[in-house]
Image (cartoon, rainbow, N blue to C red):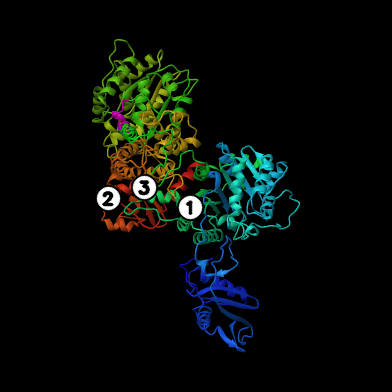
Amino acid sequence: MIMPDQEIKVPDRIYTWVDVDAHLAALAAAGRWPEWLQECDAFWDGLEVTIDPQASPQEATAWLGDVFGVSSTTLHEGETVLKLDDVPGHPSARLLPISVRRRELETPRREPRWRERRIVRSLGEPLPHPEIPFPGNVRIAAMHSFKGGVGRTLHGVALADAIAQRGERVLLVDADLEAPGITWMFRAQGRRVDFGYEDFLALLHSSDDGRPDDAVRLGAAYLPNQRIDNVIVMPTRRSLLDIAPPRLEPTDLLTPDRSIYYLTESLAELAERLGARTVLIDLRAGSSELAAPILLDPRIQRIFVTTVSDQSLYGTLRTIQELGRRAPTRTDDPASVAVITQFREDGHRELAVSAATRLRDAISGTLEPNTQEGEDRTVDRDVTLEPIFSVFQDRLLALPASWEAVVDLVRRQQLAEPLAPLIEGLVVSKEPALTDQGPATEPSHVITGDNDVTRLRGVLSEFAGRLAYAETADDTDFLPTESLRKMLVSHRTEPPLCVVTGAKGSGKTFTQLQMCFRGTWPDYARDVGVDGVTLDALLAPVLVSKNLSESALERIGEIQRNASAFRDAAPATQLELRDLIDQALRTQSTNVQWRRVWLTCMARALGIDASPEDVERKLADFASTNMRIFLFDGLEDLLQDLLDSDVQRQALRVLLIDCLDWLRSLRGRPLGLVIFVRRDLVQSAIRQNYGQFFARYSDYELKWNHSEALRLALWVAQRSGAFPQHASEAAASVRNQDLSTALHPLWGEKMGSPKSREARSDGWFLAALSDFNEQIQARDIVTFLKESAALSVEDRNWPARLLTPAAMRKALVQCSLDKIRAITEESPQVGDLLRRLDDLPSDKKRIPFSPETVDLSSQQLEVLAGNGVVFREEDQYWIPEIFRHGLSFKATGRPKILAIANLVRQRNNLD
């Protein structure tokens, strides 16, 4: 396999005509033939060279002498010959006669083979591209590996099963004619095989009219009997007793009366007849002609499975590069995908990231460039090309025999989880075809008309803008998340005593407000969707964010009055409670004294006239006949110097530990306490054993995983009124695997038309907003929706979606700036380091970078790494997109950003 830009040297050894043939073919593939040379045909008895009628035989002989080495051609008994290598030190008597003929040569037919039969000039050109797509919008994917034993078949089964679980019918073909794997699983299930891949090949071969009618008709008659759930299995052959090599190979179908893509087009017709919109083919490993006619069809989605071992990786890279030369894909063809398997995240991380980069670079060589000048498409490119990581799992070493047992193991080990991007791509889209500029026809679920879509985009932007800052959001609707459910599920019968941590913008204030607005624990549980809650307790806000709107503060005051201990008791105001804490911060207090200050705040929030001296007795008396759940937020407003103040750290530490312990000591635990606080403040206050502290409350942490981030985007779009109410079910009830499709009316299937090579919109969104700690904040999501919708208002090219691709890309810049501003407010130390990066001259703002380039110490870079701002790989550092744009760093080469982020996600999934 030779790429055009490779240097082709004179062969070290020429033993036989086979070496001659191979060298001439390599020169042709590299475009190194002179214009007058038409064809070369080497065999054991001679080399025949065909040249243009105007060229001279002497010129041909001279050229052969150049490319095969000095004095490699000579005259022998009046005949021009090529010298073959002999025993060193002996004059060669091994000669290959050369004959040169001049004539016009018809354009030869090119065929999808690894080793083409005729060595002609056109070997340096790609195979002819298919003229039409597969019939019935059928999508075909082929699993290939250069080495066996890398998990190709197992991942193929996982992929087929996952697509089938989406409700799609899959035709799964075992095309490994020498070492079938799926066939053995199917037969071990006790299923009878009436129709196999060899039968299909034989019927196609016997067709004399270039049509697959017989093969399709018979296959459609018998294959439904080989269906397991939604997977129709086409084993290699009917009998496993026959272990002889196949009688027919796919290349036997390449006759002049048939299309060179006869096999793949016939498989598509068969799938359409069976009602299967997806065909998945498990190919023979290696550079086998058994796989060539399928791999060399650019309409096939090529899925390359490899480990990080050098042999497997190098062979895969060369295969991809050769496919890029022979059968490059066009804009509407599916992109190749690499799956990296059998590596341990803890020991092979650097190898895996390096392998991902090399594979991404190789795959990019099969793509046509699609970037407009001046447009930063780093996220698009990485999402489209990023390999998939499937880490090593011990339980997959020894596979059971039967299909059902293998599928059960695959499901239990969640092998399909990392394959989600592939699954989304192979499930046939319900969205109408779009042009590169926009939709060709309007989908029925979107309101048509420029005025309508313009208005709806404005509605979405305005609503998301109100949600971006919880302090100004008076809306009483919210999206239940897994952390909220866990809190309620764990406290159905007794009040919660817990700490809810989260980064700035994760939704702490918004969550506290939604709790307050419900008034009671059962009402809150009802709206979260948790049943069986028997605890009937009022919710009592103590401290709230001082930046709340006036209307929100009025509602909080009403809720405090409803929760007060006595009808005529007036709860303390927020100002009075803050004054109490400010006064305590100016004195030296013991932990016990601070505990009583916080308890006094709780008592006075209920209208109990208590002081630090008698608060414990009065709260205990109240709790003997009453239940309440106290809510704290806005602590960062009171403790603004926490990083530098021992007193403030002590105050927070006592609230988080001592107060909760005192409330736990009350008989029957009648009083609950939920504290919303930034994670970095907790870490500063609890410097010893903070890991154990976080672990205790980890279930309630406000972390937005990828599914919840997509669900929030869907909820905001629906709740704004801009999203068609009948386009999908409510966001909270959409299954995780259906979220991508449910979001199509918001941002389409891809950042372009569904058949384009652009990134999938949901994958782009997640990659753009994630940091290197795999964190996405709620505020970043709603800010992105606000900015994207506003920038989409004047765009007339995409009436089929609310957010246009160009607007989404532009919005990322503002989101990045807001993210940097937020983390600066949250952590002044991190903010100072970000300012230093931002102040660098433009020629130093390149990723990856070294510590010397940015003048930061290893300790300072570790601080940034701990906050997800940078990631170290060997001696270089990377910045995620959510920070890169705001800092104006440029990506040089092809970044490893997503490779690193995906490894982080893989590790989190397996923990």
Mark 1 belongs to which amino acid?
Answer: Arg
Q: Look at the numbered disc 3 and give the secondary structure of its residue.
A: helix
In the figure, is residue 785 to the left or right of 113?
left
Extent of the magenta region: 462-474
Q: Please identify the residue farthest to the bottom as the structure is shown.
A: 77
Q: Out of 44 and 313, give the one closest to the viewer.
A: 44
Camera-side mark, 2 or 3:
3
Q: Please identify the residue farthest to the right as the structure is shown.
A: 241
Q: Position of residue 426 (x, y in %)?
A: 52, 44
Q: Main secondary structure of the magenta part?
A: helix
Answer with the quarter of the image where residue 693 lies. Answer: top left
| Residue in the picture at 58% in, 51% down | 265
Residue position marked by numbered label 2 in the rendering: 838
Residue position marked by numbered label 1 in the rendering: 349
Residue position marked by numbered label 3 in the rendering: 881
Question: Does residue 463 belong to the magenta stretch?
Answer: yes
Answer with the quarter of the image where residue 771 lies. Answer: top left
Q: Is residue 72 above or below residue 462?
A: below
Q: Out of 830 and 119, give the one closest to the viewer.
A: 119
Q: Residues within 10 Å of mark 3 (few under 14, many from 20)?
A: many
Question: Does residue 685 belong to the magenta stretch?
Answer: no
Q: Quadrant of the N terminus?
A: bottom right
Q: Position of residue 126 (x, y in %)?
A: 50, 62
